[in-house]
Image (cartoon, grey):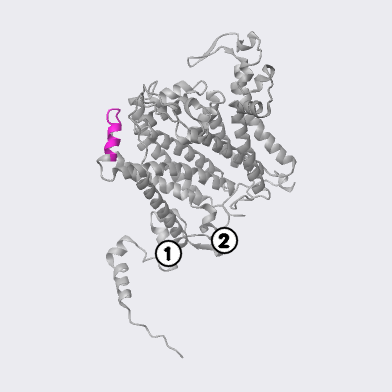
Amino acid sequence: MATAVVARPVARPQERARDEEVLVWPDLVFVEFIAAMVFTLTTFLLSAIINAPLLDQANPDVTPNPSKAPWYFLNLQELLLHMDKGLAGVIVPAVWLGLMAVFPYFDTDNEGQGVWFGTENAVKITIVSGIISFVGTWLLILWDNGNIASYLNNWFGLSGGDSLRFLENARAFQSQLPWPAWSTHIPYLWFDLTILDQPFHHLNFPAWLVEQAIPVAFMVGLPSIMVFVMWRIGWIRTRRDALLSVFTGFVMTMGVLTIVGTAFRSESEELVWPWQLKLSEGIPGQE
Amino acid sequence: MAVETPTKPTIADKIYDKMFHNYVWKSIFRTGYPNTPRNQMLVVATNVFLHLHPTRIHRTHVKITHTYCLGGLTFFMFLGLTVTGILLMFYYVPSVERAYLDIQNIETTVQFGQLMRNMHRWMAHAMVILVFLHMMRVFYTGAYKPPREFNWVVGVILLVLTFLLSFTGYLLPWDQLAFWAITVGTNIAGAAPVLGPKTRFWLLGGFEVGPDALIRFYTLHVIGLPLLAAIFMAVHFWRIRRDGGLARPL
């Protein structure tokens, strides 16, 4: 309470603790030197053993199946199988980078810095958030791919029949529900709006629901529920704790998406085990 | 009472004296050989490369498990990529007709060409991984907290620049892997609402990946983005010092 009435001064660099200091040469310079040498040798040896890939010359007429982005963008490529391309490929990463940039303006408390996992429950929050995100992301991918429905059907004989088919995956909400004709054709405004040659005339509500609304609800809602529950059971006590949960969840989700996009997506983006992965280079006669 | 008598200098002492106390050495390094605390501090303070560092540092920061050297190693990868990149530039012409053949030439006829290309490739992957791990380290040690707020923002910008550096380099070999990865990647950018198609056109210099895209990516990869990254790195390192060095408990 006391902090609420005391004006918070602008954070300044800490006082130096001179009696706790060591000399940069040799104590730090040598550590850096060794680290640099280890990495030089490692990349040198790696380069001596493994050659950088070089496929056939670029040919716009021959499309490899699947065509994959560089590995660090495969998380986005995986994400855009499940929702609107603009949402997955641009809005989600842009919003996330923006949110991440303002972390320190949200968590302005300077306690707990300079040590790993600075708060009492930090390790617990990190581990549990990581596990929840790992399992949750896999479940969502499997559900949207229709795998959960087929597991229920094949292993337990559970079949919802045609009336429950709309739960099979996210896009089934659009294709398996009897939407009235007008719902696919709702005008935005009383005139036809065009921005930069792109028409914004009608809203296709079922398409908007499965491409935008449901994914956003999941991406905003599930982390919010995770943070809320951890707050209610008393694990999350500060903004730092909340950020630990959200950041860990995001990193783990992106990690799972990267791995799925890299090692589990085969021809025509089919979900397979890594050992069933087929990568056609798209060279005619070499299929 | 024992009296200290000066011992005669050994051969090693004489060689040492000749090497480090002569006119030429002193013209290059103003301080003596850094074997006394005074010289050790002076060498850090007066050497242009070492003066990024303070002369003394809190003892918890030299513990390897505090930082794992991740930020420094990211910078080291950047330096390594600059060196190998310059060597590759001697042989590579960014034209659709020549690019692929030049890469084949680098691999087959240039002395150590394959090694240089491999090092450039694996160091690039290492840099992406290291910069990401460095961000995780900074986050989990709470090092973004005040007074280092702005340096975290600079770090986020450097993360994006690292991705862009790697992405623009990906096209240059002009093989199927490069061509289609950039096609997929720029299609993702092109899917942005409203601004997408224009952004994609601007990135590629056309409607599809072609000669104009190659020269754009090349220019960005070898000069535009490295310069930008160097500026932000300079700010990043400067701010570490100005904000009181590495974060430590209050």
Residue B40, numbered circle: 1
Comparing A232 with B174, the one in front is B174
Kindly identify the residue that appears in the image at 58 percent across and 54 percent down.
B248
- The answer to whether residue B235 is left or right of residue A119 is left
> How far across and how far down the image is residue A13, in percent?
56, 52
> How far across and how far down the image is residue A31, in percent?
46, 58
Q: Do labels 2 and 1 share a chain?
A: no
Kindly identify the residue that appears in the image at 47 percent across and 23 percent down.
B190
Please, which residue is most extreme toward the bottom here?
Answer: B1
Quadrant of residue B214 within the rendered picture: top left
Q: What residue type is labelled 2?
A: Ala
> How far across and how far down the image is residue A180, in percent?
66, 10
Q: Is residue A88 above or below residue A36?
A: above
Q: What element carries label 1?
A: helix
Is B102 covered by the magenta stretch? yes
Magenta residue span: B94-107
